[in-house]
Image (cartoon, rainbow, N blue to C red):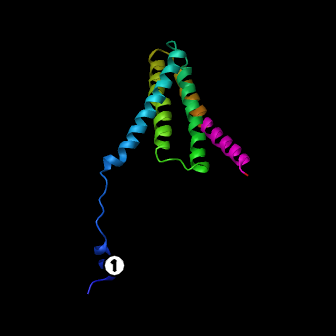
Amino acid sequence: MTAPEAESLRARPQTTRRPAWRTQAPVVAVVALGGAIGATARYALSLWWPTPPGHFPWATFWTNVIGCAVIGVFMVVISDVWAAHRLVRPFFGTGVLGGFTTFSTFAVDIQKLVDSGHPRTGLAYLAATLLAALTAVWLAVAAARRVLKWRQP
């Protein structure tokens, strides 16, 4: 005699699973599209506000600070308010904002400042970016929660 659990397991029909690439392909596609949009916006800002050698890289600084603030608001909206489609977070959070903000340019800017004999500016840029980015996320989350709480009936 067999256990009831074993009989019920055998009675279930085999389901076919979709290949992993079919499940992940839409996610990869929206991340790539969002990343292209975000990186293009960042590049446009760097062309609009170029940094002379040895000077504080304001365009990259404000790109990262603004991107951190936007991601703070975005996370509150999709976590506390809106049940977003499964591709919204990868598209906007990972893609657009990941392409817009930039750790690599931040690191290269610091290295260029140090190599060109401006270590104080590089250190100030490093500290100011970290402090401003973290503050921007915190303030944006707090403000978004306050505004959204105020708007609820």
Q: Position of residue 27 (x, y in %)?
A: 40, 43
Q: Residue at x 31, y 83 (%)?
A: 3
143 in the magenta segment: yes
**Picture coordinates of residue 8, whole percent (x, y):** 32, 77
Choose top left, top right, bottom left or bottom right for residue 75.
Answer: top right
* Circle 1: residue type: Glu
Q: Tell me, yes or no, if residue 49 can be seen here.
A: no
Where residue 26 appears, as percent x and y from the top left, is: 39, 43
Magenta span: predominant SS is helix
Q: Which residues are magenta?
A: 135-152
- Answer whether residue 110 is visible to the viewer in this image: yes
Q: Is residue 78 left or right of residue 90?
A: right
- Comparing 95 with 12, the one in front is 12
Q: On the image, numbered disc 1 is attached to which residue?
A: 5
Residue 91 location, x and y as percent? 47, 39
Residue 151 in the image: above or below residue 70: below
The relative height of residue 76 versus residue 125 in the rendered view (above or below) is below
Extreme-left residue of the structure:
1
Query: Where the N terminus falls, by quadrant?
Result: bottom left
